[in-house]
Image (spheres, rainbow, N blue to C red):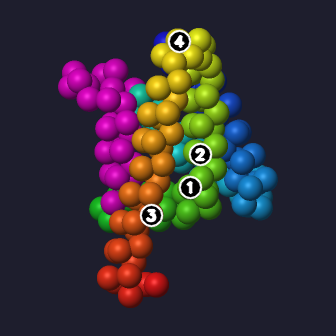
Amino acid sequence: MRYIEWAVLFIISGLGIALANFVGFQVGFMESLPGVAVLLVIAFLGLVASKLIPLKLPIVAYVSIIGLLAACPASPIREFVIESANKINFTAPLTMVGAYAGMSISDQIKTFVKQGWKMILIGVFVMTGTFLGSAIVSQVVLSLTNVI
């Protein structure tokens, strides 16, 4: 995919994140734009780094490293990055990720249905087990640390 196409997708995603942040968490659209811009620049730099650096790491690894470097104490832009990103609620970008995931698997529904009812049952058990396991671990850790 060309960088211009990625840039257009990043802009659309950024607007979606800002809109989700506004609708879901009542953070002003203009107030959240610097945070969205910071996140998108880090993501775009991760994309470029994955194409230029010969190591075969996933784009997520490059984005994470660049984000950590931008927010580390030695970074001159640390305060701006952290202050801007703090205005974006964590679940606002997840709204866009969920939408993209739904669109990406929508053409595979027929393949999933061909797997039969057993696959659906296994999926329900896996999701339920994951949720219950996470809830149990959270309960134990929060109880041990006297948070609850």
Tell which tag, 4 or 1, sits nearer the viewer.
Answer: 4
Does residue 67 lie above or below 51 as drawn? below
Q: Which of the two discs, 1 and 3, labels the residue nearer the N terminus? A: 1
Residue 49 included in the magenta stretch of the image: yes
What is the spatial separation of the Cα atoms under label 1 and label 3, in whole angstroms? Answer: 20 Å
- SS for callout 3: helix
| Residue 2 appears in the figure | no
What is the spatial separation of the Cα atoms under label 4 and label 1, in whole angstroms? Answer: 36 Å
Give residue 55's position: percent from left, percent from top.
21, 25
Location of mark 3 (residue)? 135
Tell which tag, 1 or 3, sits nearer the viewer.
Answer: 3
Does residue 122 lie above or below 138 as drawn? above
Residue type at numbered disc 3: Ala
| Residue 132 appears in the figure | yes
Residue type at numbered disc 4: Lys
Residue at 63 percent across and 23 percent down: it is 103
Label 2 with label 1: CB-CB less than 8 Å = yes
Residue 63 included in the magenta stretch of the image: yes
